[in-house]
Amino acid sequence: MIRRVASSEALQVRFWGIRGSTCASGPQFVEFGSHTPCVEVRCGERLFILDAGTGLSALGMELGQDAPEKIDILLSHLHLDHISGLPFFKPALLAKERVIRTYCGHLDGESAMEPLGRLFAPPLFPVRLGQLPARFEYHGFRAGEPITFDDGTRIETHLLNHPGGATGFRLSHRGRSICYISDVEHSDPWPDPGLAAFVRNADLMIFDGMFSDAEYSYCRGWGHSTWQKGVELSKAAGVKALAIFHLYPGHDDAFLKKAEAEMQAVMPTAFMARERQFIAFEPADDEMVADRPETAKVPAV
């Protein structure tokens, strides 16, 4: 069970989907989980959802009737593993007054309305998003530009190296910060100076570590990275803790635990993300608290 022990002013993270490309299934995938990308972030009481993979369905079941009337979903990009949970998001079915706002930054300023409308429509899908009780709004921006919301909240963004583009996000609250860097391929040389500046001194970086070093040589150009490159970026940028994310669906619990041990030997504050794992960063003058598996050695900072 997840125990939320954070104060109402904490910057909170909860993982709902941690796999990349497709879901994983079977008894060998229990510890880390099976859903595709979805991360819940709360800046105090303010809710943001990062990506809408199949993990969005599990988050929606948790939120239920308690979901806010306005829900903001930040889409890193529109590949299927990052959007396939949208029609199965329970809060979209429970209230006609609810507004679900999507933000997309890799389409040269265009919103996700047109591509999502093509996908979630016959013959590919039986129900259009516009047929759901909640109202969907679509907002476009250019990755690299900040997003400012109607309550004054500001989120920084960064263009990522991924086929077709993707957006990284930096969310800050009360002196704490989290960077979401999903779907990025490391450059040569590495670390990329612009990306290092973007994530500098973050309390937590969530980073695409889909492949092992050995696998990457066969998958070059596919838009993904390794935990080793995540550690290099973290150390160069002074990132305090690292969550490896977008895990390859063929990597089972045994593989990931072994890789996590190797990673923690060089960066003790790094870990492989686990579904429903919860981490909270208290305001900067307080201590971070976390409820997590023992192997996820995130320190107090």
Image: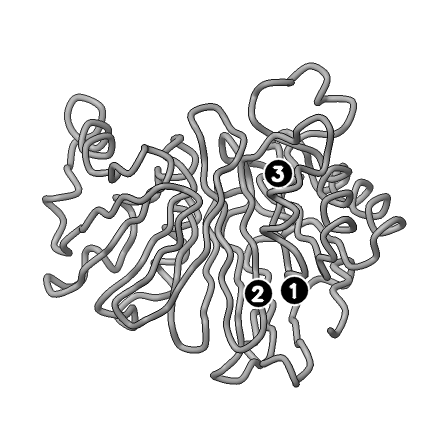
Q: Mark 1 or mark 2: name the one nearer the start of the chain.
A: 2
Residue 176, image x, y percentages? 58, 71
In this picture, residue 135 sits left or right of residue 71: left
Q: Which residue is mark 3?
A: 247
Secondary structure beneath label 2: strand
Residue 210, image x, y percentages? 64, 33
The residue furthest right is 265
Say which residue appears at 68% left-offset and 61% top-offset. 201
In this picture, residue 189 sits left or right of residue 86: right
Q: Which mark is residue 180?
A: none
Q: Mark 3 or mark 2: name the one nearer the start of the chain.
A: 2
Secondary structure beneath label 3: loop
Residue 194, above or below 289: above
Near-viewer residue (146 or 42): 146
Three-letter amino acid code at disc 2? Ser
Say which residue appears at 82% left-offset and 46% top-offset. 263
**Mark-to-mark CA distance, 3 and 2:** 23 Å
Q: State the scheme by which the image is colored.
A: one colour
Occupied quadrant, residue 248: top right
In this picture, residue 255 sits left or right of residue 54: right
* Disc 3: CA contacts within 10 A as few (<14), some (14-19) or many (>=20): many
Decide: marks 1, 2 in contact (CB < 8 A)?
Answer: yes
- Please identify, in this view, whether the residue under mark 3 or under mark 2 is nearer the observer: 2
* Disc 2: CA contacts within 10 A as few (<14), some (14-19) or many (>=20): many
Three-letter amino acid code at disc 3? Leu
Q: Mark 3 or mark 1: name the one nearer the start of the chain.
A: 1
Question: Image quadrant for the C terminus?
Answer: bottom right
Q: Which residue is mark 1?
A: 203
Q: Which residue is mark 2?
A: 177
The residue furthest top is 218
